Image: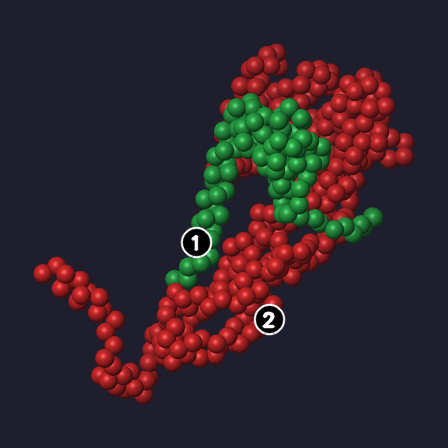
Amino acid sequence: MKYKDYYAILGVDRAAGADDIKKAYRKLARKYHPDVSKEPDAEEKFKEMAEAYETLKDPEKRAAYDQLGRHAAGQDFEPPPDWGQQFAGARTAFDDIDLADLFAGLAGRQRAGRRGPGAFSSGRDYEAAVRLSFEQAFHGTEIELDLSVLESDAQGVVRRVPRRIHARIPKGVSDGQQLRIPGKGGKGVEGGRDGDLYLDIVVESHPWYRVDGQDIYLDLPLAPWEAVLGTTVRLPTPAGTVSLKVPPGTRAGQQLRLAGRGLARAGAPAGNLHAIVQIVVPSVVDGQERALLQQLAEASTFNPRAHFEQESVHEH
Amino acid sequence: MNIETCEALRIDERGEISWTQLIELSGLDETELKELVDDGALAPLRAEALPWHFHARSVVVARTAGRLRREFDLDAHGLAVVMRFLSRIEELEAELQALRAGVARRR
C-alpha cells in the first residue's frame, strides 16, 4: 500500500487541532471543489483533500492513521502487525487496496460497532458517469461498465476486485439525469442493505436535434419559393424519416409540430417533435434564376416594410 | 470475471417514496433530512399525513445535499442556502435550455 501524507495534503501540522484541520479543509474546498474551481487539476486535487479530511476529522480514524507511522508520500509500506486487529477488526489484503479503502472500511465497522453486536451496516453507493449518443438515449441501449469495488472473500479478507456490469438503459433518458441500479454498490455488512450503483447520464449533443424535456426541436431550412408555394419535405426524425407537408405561406420561425415524435418514456406519452422553419437564400444564383427573380421583383406588389410607413404616418 | 446484466432504473420521475426509503437512498441521517424539510429544500407530498411521502425526484435532491454537505463541510444553515441557490440555478438552466431549443440556430 502506498503512503499518503494527509497532513501535508491539507497543509496542516501533525499536531493541529480539529478546528485548524476544519478551517484548512474548508479553505481548500472553496478553491478546489470541481463545482466551483477553475484550477486545471481541481478534481484530482479535491479528491485527495476530501479523502484526507474524511480521515483526519474523525478522532478514531485520525488515531488509526497516526498509528500507521510516518513515511514519505508515495512510499510503499505495511501497517504495523497488530494494526488490523486493533482498528479494522478484520483481515485486510493490504496490497490490493489503498488508504482511502482502508479508512472507508473502518467507518462501516465503527457504525456497526456502535449499534452493538449483530448490528448491520449498509454497503457503499458507487457512482459512474455514462456517456450516450443522442440515438442511444432516444432508443435506449445496453452498456458495459468496468468498476473496481471492495469485496470481502469467503475468509472475510477485504480486497479490491474488478466487476463488469452489463446494464440496460431505458429509452428516453436525458442529459443530467441519474439512473439507479439497486444492490450493485458495495456489499452490506452483517446483513445490511447492499449499496446501489448510480449512473450519471451525459447525452452528447446532436448536430440537428435539441431537447427540451420530452420535446425535440430541429431547424427546417426552406427556400423562399418553397415557403411561399408550400411543399412536401422529407424530414429526418430520430425514429425514421417522415414526409412533412409545409403549407403555402409558411413564415420563418414558425413551428411545424409532429405529435408523438419526441422522446418516449415507458409509461408516459411521448413528447412532440417541432420543426422550426428557417428561410434560407442561395448564395449563388445562375443566369436563369436571376432572370426569374428579377421578373418576380418587378411583378410583385408585396411590401414587407409596410409597417415602417404606417409608423412614420403616426409621427407626423 | 462475472458479468451481470441489470436494469438501470429512473429515480427522478413519477412515483412516490417513503420517508424510510429516502433515508436509505440519500445517505443522510434522519436529523439532516428533517432539516432539509424544515428549510423547504425537500417537500413532503402531504405534509399533514404521517409518515411522510415524497416525490421520487426528492432522492436526487437529498443525495446532492448529502454530497455538498460532506464535500464543503457545510453546516445545516449553509446547506439550506446552497440548496436554495442550486434550485434557482437549475430553474434558470432549464429555462435557458427551453429557449435555446425553441429558437432556430443562426446559419
Crowd band around label 1 with a 10 angstrom C-alpha radius: few (<14), some (14–19), many (20+)? few
Q: Residue at x 73, y 40 (%)?
A: A196
Task: Identify which residue, A172 or B70, lies in the foreground.
Answer: A172
Q: Are marks 2 and 1 on the same chain?
A: no
- Can you see residue A140? yes
Chain that is green in the image? B
Task: Identify which residue, A25 or B67, lies in the foreground.
Answer: B67
Q: Which residue is the site of mark 1?
A: B99
Q: Helix, strand, or loop for circle 1?
A: helix
Q: Residue A10, percent across and down?
A: 57, 23
Left or right, A66 with respect to A152, comes to left
Task: Identify which residue, B52 or A109, lies in the foreground.
Answer: B52
Chain that is red in the image? A
Q: Residue at x 66, y 45 (%)?
A: B15
Exactly how many numbered labels are in the figure?
A: 2
Residue B40 lies, with reference to residue A294, above or below; the image says above
Label 2 close to label 1 by CB (< 8 Å): no
Instruction: Using the image, name the chain to which the residue with label 1 belongs.
Output: B
Task: Identify which residue, B93 or A1, lies in the foreground.
Answer: B93
Q: Residue A102, percent across and down?
A: 75, 27
Q: Residue A69, percent across and down?
A: 71, 17
Residue B22 lies, with reference to residue A13, above or below; the image says below
Which quarter of the figure has residue A204?
A: bottom right
Q: Disc number at residue A240?
A: 2
Amino acid bearing label 2: Gly
Instruction: Using the image, name the chain to which the residue with label 2 belongs.
Output: A
User: Residue pushed farthest left?
Assistant: A316
Residue A274 lies, with reference to residue A60, above or below; the image says below
